[in-house]
Amino acid sequence: MSDRVRFIPNPAGPDPVVLINLTELAAPLDALPFIIEARDLIATQPHNSVCCLVDVTAARFNTDVVEALKDLAAHNKPHVIASALIGVTGLQRIILESVIKFTGRKNLKALATRAEGFAWIAQQRTGVTAAA
């Protein structure tokens, strides 16, 4: 695991989350190896067991990155309880909406800060635990 894709503690809950840190990469294509790494890591986890915090603050996207994010969201759908996206602005919000539409994922939410993301993730995990 790299520093950009790894399990980290959730300060708002007992379970760790997968951090996918795509912040401030120099070029859009620099994100691709980390998106692939996240896909591979999440795919090794049991179904309905993973929460993700995806930070795209100051990230730059192109069509290759958007397609890779769509693939990540679709491929790992069975494994993921919820994903919080941080730093989504302007065009990225439109891209996020297209990813949600493409994948049918209703458990993706854009939030303003990591603290809000952690709190929302903890709420989603609690809902899954209560339903189990």
Image (cartoon, rainbow, N blue to C red):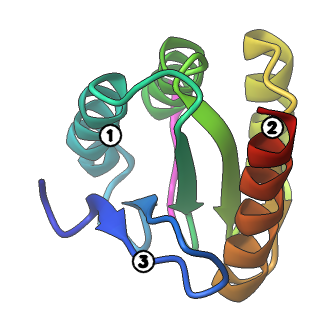
Q: Which residue is mark 2?
A: 107
Callout 1: few (<14), some (14-19), or many (20+) C-alpha neighbours within 10 Å? Answer: many
123 lies left or right of 56: right
SS class of the residue under badge 1? helix
- Amino acid type indicated by mark 2: Asn
Q: Residue at x 86, y 18 (%)?
A: 101
Callout 3: few (<14), some (14-19), or many (20+) C-alpha neighbours within 10 Å? Answer: few
Q: Considering only order in the chain, which callout, 2 or 1, is on the residue closer to the N terminus?
A: 1
**Vertically, is 129 above or below 8?**
above
Q: Nearer the viewer, mark 3 or mark 2?
A: 3
Depth check: give the residue in front, 99 or 115. 115
Q: Which residue is mark 1?
A: 38
Q: Which residue is mark 3?
A: 9
Q: Residue at x 84, y 46 (%)?
A: 130
Our reading of the magenta stretch's main secondary structure is loop
- Amino acid type indicated by mark 1: Ala
- Bounds of the magenta span? 59-63
Q: What is the CA distance from the residue labelled 3 to the residue labelled 2?
A: 20 Å
Give x and y (percent) for residue 68: 44, 24
Q: What is the CA distance from the residue labelled 1 to the residue labelled 3?
A: 17 Å
Q: Residue at x 79, y 80 (%)?
A: 116
2 lies left or right of 13: left
Q: Considering only order in the chain, which callout, 2 or 3, is on the residue closer to the N terminus?
A: 3
- Amino acid type indicated by mark 3: Pro
SS class of the residue under badge 3? loop
For the C terminus, give its image quadrant.
top right
